[in-house]
Image (cartoon, rainbow, N blue to C red):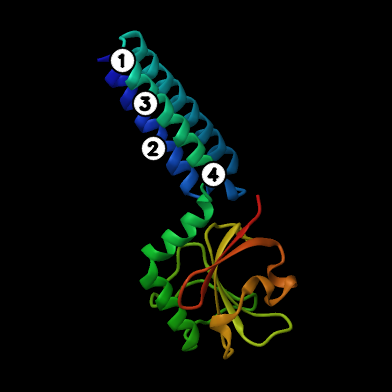
Amino acid sequence: MRTAGFAAIGVVGWLCVIVGHYFPWRGYYDSAPLAVSLLFIAYVVAILATVAWVVRFWRRGHHAWASAVGGAAIVLVVTITQVPWNGVFGRSWYAAHHAKFQALADAARQGELHPDSDGWVRGRDSSVPNFGHGLQDVSVPKAPGRVLIAGMSSEEVSENVYLYIYGRPDAAQIDPCTLTKATFGEYYRCTRLSAGWWWLQRGY
């Protein structure tokens, strides 16, 4: 019974670790300390439960099972720590909300967005989709065209953003990271998605 309990706690703990890595909480100033603390707790619980699970198997003479669980835990830790989770999040979130991103792109191209003097589109019009953190529609310094920015946090300068460049004939082929250093120089990784969208994330 205890072995099953340790197994259940270990599985739940590792699932919490994976979820904690998947969502980019640590990149947000407003929740980074809490996110890191919760992730640390999840790691400790998962590791302790797994060790207890292995010990129970070993003491009962199930050495093969103990080795298998221990080996699987090591592989899991290496995999979790090596996966580029932020990029995985960016791609999967885009795929899951593709219809909303397409609607935003259509609204931008058709001139249906009405930004204020600072470029913010607050989504007062219910026909303009947003993700709850506001949108920006701004011109690109020293280059023709405009950029629609969908941030993934409520911070004024989001750690992770989606970009859609439009208003110029080669917009779909533009790499926003090299378009102008003044605008996107602070970001170190850019991922091309589809339909002209990009995922930009800042180095941590």
The answer to whether the residue labelled 4 contacts the one labelled 1, judged by CB atoms less than 8 Å apart, is no
Disc with the residue nearer the chain's start (4 vs 1) = 1
Say which residue appears at 52% left-offset and 57% top-offset: 87
Dividing the picture into quadrants, the one containing residue 158 is bottom right
Disc with the residue nearer the chain's start (2 vs 1) = 2
Image quadrant in which the N terminus is located? top left
Residue 128 visible in the shown view = no
Camera-side residue of 65 and 46: 65
User: From the viewer's perspective, is residue 128 above or below residue 156?
Assistant: below
Three-letter amino acid code at the position of disc 2: Leu
Three-letter amino acid code at the position of disc 1: His
Tell which tag, 2 or 1, sits nearer the viewer: 1
Residue 165 visible in the shown view = yes
Left or right of 72 in this view: 43: right
Question: Which mark is on residue 15?
Answer: 2
Which residue is labeled 3 in the image? 68
Question: Which mark is on residue 62?
Answer: 1
Disc with the residue nearer the chain's start (2 vs 4) = 2
Disc with the residue nearer the chain's start (1 vs 3) = 1
Say which residue appears at 59% left-offset and 50% top-offset: 27
Three-letter amino acid code at the position of disc 3: Ala
Three-letter amino acid code at the position of disc 4: Gln
